[in-house]
Amino acid sequence: MENFINVFTEKDKEYLIQNGYTLLNAQKNGDTTIYIFKNDSNKMTFSEKDRGRFLFTNILTF
């Protein structure tokens, strides 16, 4: 299981916050802001559709 979740929209950021995920960092990449969350696997189960919206990774960047 990946330790972190990256999201690329304000809507997805709010969705994870509302579901109890911890926002670790937000960084700008050109015109896009990347929001990095800790992946706490016991909070939600992600569907295949969700895997298209979120980037799951073991790499943490600041």
Image: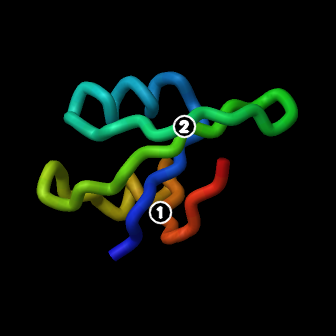
The N terminus: image quadrant: bottom left
Foreground: disc 2 or disc 1: 2
**Residue at numbered disc 2:** 25
Secondary structure of the residue carrying tag 2 is strand
Q: Is residue 28 left or right of residue 23?
A: right
Comes first in the chain, label 2 or label 1: 2
Name which quarter of the figure residue 34 lies in. Answer: top right
Residue drawn at point x = 46 percent, y = 24 percent: 11
In this rendering, the answer to whether 61 lies above or below 34 is below
Q: Say if 5 sits above or below 21 in the image.
A: below
Q: Secondary structure at mark 1?
A: strand
Q: Position of residue 33 (x, y in %)?
A: 68, 31
Q: Position of residue 48 (x, y in %)?
A: 36, 63
**Mark 1 belongs to which amino acid?**
Phe
Depth order, front residue of 38/55: 38
- Give the side of residue 7 with respect to residue 33, left or right: left
Horizontal side of residue 33 vs 37, given as left or right: right
Dividing the picture into quadrants, the one containing residue 42 is: bottom left
Q: Give 49 or 31, whichever is nearer the viewer.
A: 31
